[in-house]
Amino acid sequence: MKIEKITYTGKVYNIEVEPNHHTHDDQYYVNADTGIVVHNCHPRDNIALRWLAQEYNLGYDLFDTVMLAREQQAKNLADFLLDLAKKHNLPIVIHGKAYKPDVPYCIGSYSTLVACYIKTQGYSVVFVDPLADDPTDVVNDVVDPAVILLAHNRNITYGYTQQDQADRDYFEFRAGSIIVDPWRRYPNKPGLTTIHYGNTRARENQNK
């Protein structure tokens, strides 16, 4: 395999398909003339490109570096959730299992990666996601206080559309729960402890 330089004339496709595009979000679109595949999927593109680099021994694998960083960040987050759960004697719930809101696809999702690291340490975890196509460990409701990771944020994911993308809770968060929000958008609410994960300016809140 080698990289060749060619002169190309024709259409150039944006790798990101808008949700209101006629090809539909999260669906593959293959152009009949060029064979170019357009799809709105991360991290599955990186996973595929990492495999390709290894398969053809391309040398330095940038995609592997990106994915290793992603995996380490997921482990750090899992460790953070575990510390909170053990300290407060609470179960762990991940709010959203699919790789982003409003889609069912769970393969390659960040939520499942975080959950994997939690389970390897002997702690159980459940998901709440009404659209998840993988029902494993998915529940409809959590009736007790819990450490809740907000894996989904509709406003951030779809905010670029310039349309109203209000967030919504998939279930009622019970009093005494600890909300871990890596997006740093969830407001403080009576009866709940909110931690904006990664916000070093509010470190004292993470130690409560």
Image (cartoon, rainbow, N blue to C red):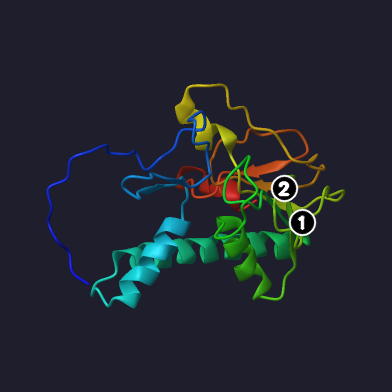
> x%, y% of residue 172?
80, 39
Residue at 83% of width from left, 50% of height from top? 142
Mark carried by residue 129: 2
Q: Is residue 196 above or below residue 133?
A: above
Q: Residues within 10 Å of mark 1 (few under 14, many from 20)?
A: some
Q: Residue furthest top?
A: 163
Residue type at tag 1: Val
- State if disc 1 and disc 2 touch (CB < 8 Å): yes
> x%, y% of residue 178?
71, 48
Q: Earlier in the sequence, mark 2 or mark 1?
A: 2
Residue at 79% of width from left, 46% of height from top? 176
Residue at 50% of width from left, 29% of height from top? 159
Q: Residue furthest front?
A: 33
Q: Quadrant of residue 68?
A: bottom left
Q: Residue furthest right?
A: 143
Residue type at tag 2: Asp
Residue at 33% of width from left, 45% of height from top? 33
Viewer-proximal residue among 186 and 28:
28
Q: Is residue 148 above or below residue 61?
A: above
> x%, y% of residue 17?
44, 37
Label 1, on which residue? Answer: 138
Q: Quadrant of residue 175?
A: top right
